[in-house]
Image (cartoon, rainbow, N blue to C red):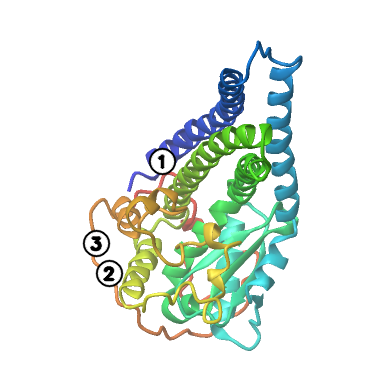
Amino acid sequence: MRFWDQQHSARAETRRLLLAFALAVLLLVAAVHGALVLAWWLMALLLPGHLPFPAGFLAANVGVSFLLILGGWWVETSNLRAGGVRLARRVGARELRPAVSHAEQRLANVVEELCIAAHMPRPQVMLLPRADAINAFAAGWDAQDAVLAVTQGALDYLTREELQGMVAHELSHLHEGDTRLKMRLAGMVFGLELVHNFGEEMREHAGLSWWFGTAIMLAGFAGWLAGRLLKAAVSRQREFLADARAVQWTRSKDGLGGVLRKVMAQCANTPPGYAENPDRMGLGHPSVQHMLLVEAGGAHGLERWLDSHPSLAERVRRIYGRSMAPLTPHPVSVAPEPAASHGGGGAPGAVPLAALVDPFARLP
């Protein structure tokens, strides 16, 4: 895997998509004004006499549009600042108990080792004890609020090397600021949706409000849909970047690659609707869907354009350079490990810190 090339490509594509997102916002504002101009002309054709545009027509249209978009962005972003740990608890996560579980001690050690090697602060590590599927997510607005939550299924079915790959992927999201970026984009999409909702509210009244409301609603819907498509595209690029970063940090294709292949096997054997059932799997909560290692459930057809994650087959192909078959997950026996020291030694089966995050190491 050419992880340097893939990281560069993902970052470049993200910049292009963010520029397109900004352009979409400006086009929406222009479209709202254009739609209102068209609505005014149509109304003028139906009424007798000359009907000039009112004073400040352009300024009012542009000002109200930006007020809705930026106001919605601020409100939604403020709501999302509730905290990574609080969000993790909301979906059923709890703090690790390494003193009573070898698997949880192993997870704590892996996180500690990778954070030291990557020169980044250690996030709060939590466990989703009722989630049998292999998955994880990272959340948080800044380093003080960062959390990394892992499912019980990941502890049960992943080897230490695979757990390192999963953790490295999630730490990459925190390292690159992806959680902040995704929350900002979610806020901006909410602002675009407010324009559509504002037009829909106006349509409920007769007369001029119906004309103008219809124009705003149609322009707002186009902007909201474009925003969702671009937000999903940005999210998919950040997943590719985190995959490449995980391979770089762990120097192992089979770490994260093995995780994704096991998830492929789990998905093939998962009954329909299982992933979306919040009673059996807290990862079905909409607040964490876009943050997961693997998106719960799956879309088909045109809905794939709105997916926040690339397909598992595509991610595996990028890691290995070719298609790979699913890997049937089996319960893993976890040997006891002492708590990791800041020197990084002592844990049986651990990859030495010197072997991690070596940008000049050649992958097998």
Pick whichever, 106 or 284, lies toward us.
284
First of labels 2, 1 by sequence position: 1
Say which mark, if any, is on residue 326. 2
Which x, y percent locates residue 318?
32, 50
Residue lying at 33% horizontally and 67% vertically, measured from the top left = 261
The quadrant in which residue 233 appears is top left
Residue sitting at 43 percent across and 77 percent down? 274
**Res. 110 image quadrant:** bottom right
Q: Residue at x 32, y 78 (%)?
A: 269
x and y, in percent, of residue 112 in the image: 61, 65
Q: Nearer the viewer, mark 1 or mark 3?
A: 3
- What separation in Å lies between label 2 and label 1 (alpha carbons)? 26 Å
Q: Nearer the viewer, residue 358 or 330?
A: 330
Label 1 belongs to which residue? Answer: 4
Query: Where on the picture, by quarter, is residue 146?
Result: bottom right
| Residue 213 place in picture, x, y as percent | 63, 37
The answer to the question of whether label 2 and label 1 lie on touching residues, with beta carbons closer than 8 A, is: no
How busy is the neighbourhood of tag 1: few (under 14 within 10 Å), some, or many (20 plus)? some
Query: In what quadrant of the picture does the C terminus appear?
Result: bottom left
Asked whether, in this view, residue 155 is left or right of residue 5, the answer is: right
Which of the two discs, 1 and 3, labels the residue nearer the N terminus? 1
